[in-house]
Image (cartoon, helix red, strand yellow):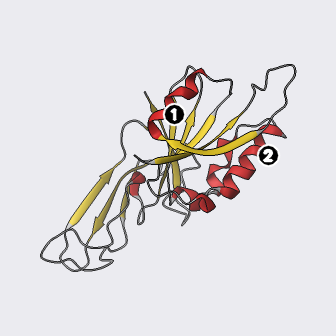
């Protein structure tokens, strides 16, 4: 079973005797459902099977500062943490609400959160790092990416990644203009 790292606030911000603090710990993914009954405002978790905590340290420190000092929700910080998105998705748990999943997308590295293969999937080709520059199809206003196509430079096999209908853009719509990629939000049951 995969380990899951989480940070959660120990008290509701609306509590008159608020003494905020945070705690980081590892637990099995199946136990995350117990958060829905605890005294917290929200919780952060990461879904990478082999999670490297060093990739999340800066994000978690800045998130705690945003929440406990400035009383702002930390998800506004995601745009400046593409290195975290390249490694894992971010899950936000709220009591009595649906879980929010934030997925980082980059046209060449992780189209709509799916890691691109390092090798051509065609069994006759199998060349390493085979893909040409991705072909990105946007909406008419060029603010939303609709699909990304990767084509092998050796055998011309193509793989099309389409934006899932449950994804909502969580950024400025700069996936085609920036090397940093773009974040998407998905509500989970």
Which numbered mark, 1 or 2, is in the foreground of this view? 1
Image quadrant occupied by the C terminus: top left
Q: Residue 154: x and y, percent?
A: 21, 80
Vertical order, 146 against 157 (above or below) = above
**Res 41 → quadrant:** top right
Q: Mark 1 falls on what kind of element?
A: helix
Q: Residue 86: x and y, percent?
A: 50, 60
**Res 18 → quadrant:** top right
| Number of callouts | 2
Sooner in the amino-acid sequence: mark 1 or mark 2: 1
Circle number at residue 44: none
**Res 35 → quadrant:** top right
| Residue 169 in view of the camera | no
In the orientation shown, which residue stands out farthest toward the right? 17
Relative side of 109 to 121, left or right = right
Q: Residue 117: x and y, percent?
A: 31, 67
Instruction: Confirm or deny contact between disc 1 and disc 2 (CB under 8 A).
Output: no
Q: Which residue sits at x=53%, y=42%?
A: 27
Q: Which residue sits at x=54%, y=27%?
A: 34
Relative side of 78 to 89, left or right = right
Circle number at residue 65: 2
Relative side of 85 to 56, left or right = left
Relative depth, front residue between 42 and 159: 42
Check disc 2: other Cα within 10 Å, few if <14, some if 14-19, many if 20+.
Answer: some
Per the image, the residue denoted by label 1 is 32
Q: Which residue sits at x=86%, y=19%?
A: 16
In the orientation shown, which residue stands out farthest toward the left? 124
Determine the CA span between mark 1 and mark 2: 24 Å
Q: Which residue sits at x=29%, y=77%?
A: 130
| Residue 157 in view of the camera | yes
């Amino acid at each position: 079973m995969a380990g899951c790292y989480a940070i959660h606030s120990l008290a509701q911000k609306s509590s008159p005797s608020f003494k905020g603090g945070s705690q980081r710990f590892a637990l099995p993914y199946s136990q995350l459902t117990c958060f829905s009954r605890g005294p917290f405002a929200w919780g952060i978790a990461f879904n990478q099977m082999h999670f490297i905590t060093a990739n999340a340290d800066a994000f978690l420190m800045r998130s705690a500062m945003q929440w406990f000092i400035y009383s702002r929700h930390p998800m506004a910080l995601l745009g400046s943490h593409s290195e975290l998105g390249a490694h894992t998705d971010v899950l936000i748990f709220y009591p009595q609400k649906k879980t929010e999943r934030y997925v980082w997308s980059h046209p060449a590295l992780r189209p709509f959160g799916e890691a691109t293969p390092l090798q051509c999937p065609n069994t006759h080709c199998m060349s390493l790092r085979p893909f040409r520059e991705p072909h990105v199809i946007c909406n008419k206003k060029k603010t939303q990416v609709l699909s990304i196509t990767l084509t092998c430079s050796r055998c011309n096999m193509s793989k099309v990644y389409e934006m899932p209908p449950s994804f909502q853009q969580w950024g400025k719509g700069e996936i085609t203009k920036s090397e940093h990629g773009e974040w998407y939000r998905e509500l989970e049951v």
